[in-house]
């Protein structure tokens, strides 16, 4: 019996107007991301792609504050899911780019990376404020 | 170092354009690129007294290296397009590319033209076959082929064509001498370097080759261009002695004050070339793919 293995794709969403503190727009949820990724796979890889990925595809985490999310996908088809992410141009009719930060085998490794990345971002902002 | 050697540049100077360019550059920096080339597209003839339309003088302080590139659209082989090494207008640009639109011009570009990049309109159906015999000639001469990914992000018909054309190109070139660039009109069409590497894998390359397409291959293009422009027979280049720094003056055994300005020249060997001397004699354009 072979265990089903996953890949965890850590991604960041970049929006056209960078003021993500804008309160007039509803914050995105992980469900919104999931729907968008699913549609993108359907569009680019068709029924076959949907079938291959649907059993494992899941957005485990998405934070609208830091715009960082974590996507789980079966290890054999992670390139397909990654491509689908690359071809996404809008989420909930907001124009958006997805940039992959890390692809990992375990959720733990990804968590470590998120924390490190967030810290870097915070420090960078602090530096800017100092100037 | 990640390169993006095709960022479209519109020559009109208005505020919208500048802001637009600025957001695209910011996006590139954010995504982790270190070198960008602004692309100016020309149809018709390049007259010798034309100068570089791309103004990068005011933007020197950004932490991204900026180059200029001229893309010339080849429509007819019989037209006099002024693509000769003596054309001064061409040497004002860092990189020279052509976009052939039919079989004849494509063959001409691969065979004879002294250029750095052959760019193909991949978002639509190509009107000619890419044959290994012709593509191989260009590869031998150190010319690179360009795949621009932005059309694939724009709409799904172009995506279909781009994937098919790119796979064809990768097949006939056997994954050699390919660069991947953006050609992004808007900042939202740019993608991160590793996303592009992954995109390369669906175009039939493996991960290592796909990564080369945005790193070492692009570097080769820049070096190839520098060799084409600044050297004599791709071997020797000249710098005026006045360009030497104070601490390098010992090389000519003189003090800077005693020099006449700008007249004397110093030869600098670009590349040790002992084993293929004959080749460098016969062809001006050396394959710089190291």
Image (cartoon, coloured by chain):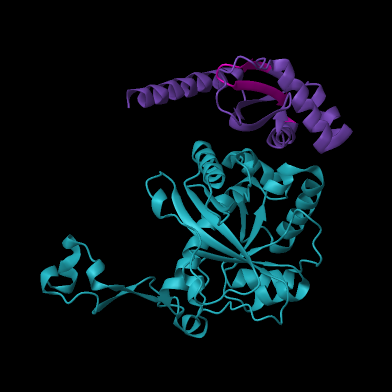
Residue B126 position in % (x across, y down): 79, 62
Q: Residue at x 74, y 69 (%)?
A: B132
Q: Residue at x 77, y 56 (%)?
A: B165
Tell me if residue B225 is in the magenta stretch: no
| Of residues B168 and B79, the one drawn nearer to the viewer in this rendering | B79
| Of residues A85 and B11, the one drawn nearer to the viewer in this rendering | B11
The colour applied to the residues of chain B in this rendering is: cyan
Residue A73 position in % (x across, y down): 72, 25
Q: Residue at x 74, y 68 (%)?
A: B101
* Chain part drawn in magenta: A60-76
The colour applied to the residues of chain A in this rendering is: purple
A23 above or below B257? above
Determine whether, in the image, residue B16 is placed left or right of residue B252.
Answer: right
Whether residue B255 appears in this view of the structure is no
Determine whether, in the image, residue A128 is placed left or right of residue A95.
Answer: left
Q: From the image, give the main secondary structure of the stretch colored magenta.
A: strand
**Quarter residue A53 falls in:** top right
């Amino acid at each position: 019996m072979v265990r089903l293995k996953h890949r965890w794709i850590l991604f960041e969403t970049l929006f056209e107007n960078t003021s993500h503190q804008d309160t007039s727009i509803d914050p995105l949820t992980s469900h919104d991301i999931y729907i968008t990724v699913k549609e993108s796979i359907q569009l680019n890889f068709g029924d076959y792609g949907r079938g291959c990925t649907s059993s494992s595809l899941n957005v485990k985490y998405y934070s609208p504050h830091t715009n960082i999310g974590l996507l789980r996908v079966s290890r054999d088809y992670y390139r397909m899911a990654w491509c689908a992410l690359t071809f996404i141009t809008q989420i909930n009719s907001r124009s958006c780019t997805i940039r992959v930060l890390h692809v990992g085998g375990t959720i733990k490794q990804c968590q470590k990376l998120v924390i490190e990345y967030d810290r870097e971002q915070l420090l960078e902002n602090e530096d800017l404020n100092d100037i | 170092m990640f390169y993006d050697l095709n960022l479209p540049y519109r020559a009109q100077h208005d505020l919208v354009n500048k802001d637009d360019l600025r957001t695209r550059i910011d996006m590139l920096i954010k995504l982790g690129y270190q070198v960008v080339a602004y692309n100016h597209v020309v149809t018709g003839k390049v007259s010798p007294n034309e100068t570089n339309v791309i103004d990068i003088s005011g933007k020197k302080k950004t932490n991204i290296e900026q180059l200029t590139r001229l893309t010339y659209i080849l429509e007819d082989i019989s037209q006099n397009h002024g693509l000769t090494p003596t054309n001064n207008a061409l040497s004002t640009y860092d990189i020279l590319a052509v976009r052939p639109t039919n079989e004849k011009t494509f063959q001409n570009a691969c065979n004879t033209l002294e250029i750095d990049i052959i760019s193909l309109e991949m978002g639509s159906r190509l009107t000619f076959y890419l044959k290994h015999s012709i593509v191989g000639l260009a590869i031998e001469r150190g010319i690179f082929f360009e795949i621009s990914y932005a059309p694939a992000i724009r709409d799904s018909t172009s995506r279909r064509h781009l994937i098919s054309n790119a796979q064809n190109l990768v097949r006939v070139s056997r994954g050699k001498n390919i660069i991947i660039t953006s050609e992004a009109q808007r900042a939202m069409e740019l993608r991160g370097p590793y996303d592009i590497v992954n995109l390369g894998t669906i175009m039939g390359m493996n991960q290592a080759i796909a990564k080369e397409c945005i790193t070492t291959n692009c570097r080769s293009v820049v070096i190839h261009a520098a060799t084409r422009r600044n050297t004599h027979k791709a071997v020797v280049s000249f710098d005026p002695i006045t360009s030497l720094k104070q601490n390098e003056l010992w090389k000519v055994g003189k003090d800077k004050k005693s020099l006449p300005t700008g007249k004397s020249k110093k030869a600098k060997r670009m590349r040790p070339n002992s084993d293929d001397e004959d080749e460098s004699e016969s062809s001006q354009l050396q394959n710089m793919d190291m």
